Image (tube, helix red, strand yellow):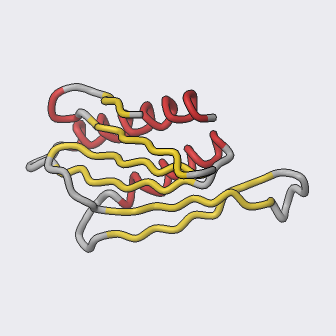
């Protein structure tokens, strides 16, 4: 499943693949690259027996800001679908403004909701 969220410089491209029971999501925009990788794994809750929660991990390329996006997206998708989820984010815009960054984060969250609607 491939789709785009947003407009102009703040467009975010989603490429979603089901890999067995799991999900891999590529999220890119601007100059495409790999800036961060996040993994959220569904695990039994130790606090609420009979319920699941997630544990998450992240790898980032030094000096990249995608870490602020990647784990929340992986966690949101994993929780919403009850599937393990890997998210790879690479979004780069020269001279990005604070408003553009907010738009990109909002577009990423909108895209995560779309993934959950389709695969949850």
Asked if 51 appears above or below 41 in the picture, the reply is above
Considering every residue shown, the one lying at the far bottom of the view is 62
**Going by the image, does 79 lie left or right of 9?**
right
Asked if 64 appears above or below 81 in the picture, the reply is below
Q: Position of residue 5 (x, y in %)?
A: 32, 29
Quarter of the image where the C terminus is located: top right
> Residue placed at 85% from the left, 61% from the top?
47
Quarter of the image where the N terminus is located: top left
Q: Position of residue 13 (x, y in %)?
A: 29, 37
Q: Nearer the viewer, residue 102 or 2?
A: 2
Considering every residue shown, the one lying at the far right of the view is 49
Asked if 89 appears above or below 97 in the picture, the reply is below
Considering every residue shown, the one lying at the far left of the view is 94
> Residue placed at 83% from the left, 65% from the top?
46
> Residue placed at 77% from the left, 53% from the top?
52
**Going by the image, does 96 lie left or right of 80?**
left
> Residue placed at 26% from the left, 43% from the top?
101
């Amino acid at each position: 499943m491939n789709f785009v969220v947003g407009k102009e410089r703040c467009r975010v491209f989603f490429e979603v693949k089901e890999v067995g029971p799991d999900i891999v999501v590529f999220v890119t925009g601007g100059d495409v690259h790999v800036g961060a990788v996040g993994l959220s794994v569904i695990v039994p809750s130790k606090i609420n027996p009979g319920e699941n929660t997630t544990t998450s991990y992240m790898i980032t390329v030094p000096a990249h800001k995608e870490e602020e996006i990647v784990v929340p997206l992986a966690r949101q998708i994993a929780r919403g679908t009850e599937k393990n989820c890997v998210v790879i984010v690479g979004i780069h815009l020269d001279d990005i403004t604070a408003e553009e960054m907010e738009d990109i984060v909002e577009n990423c969250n909108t895209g995560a909701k779309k993934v959950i609607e389709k695969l949850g």
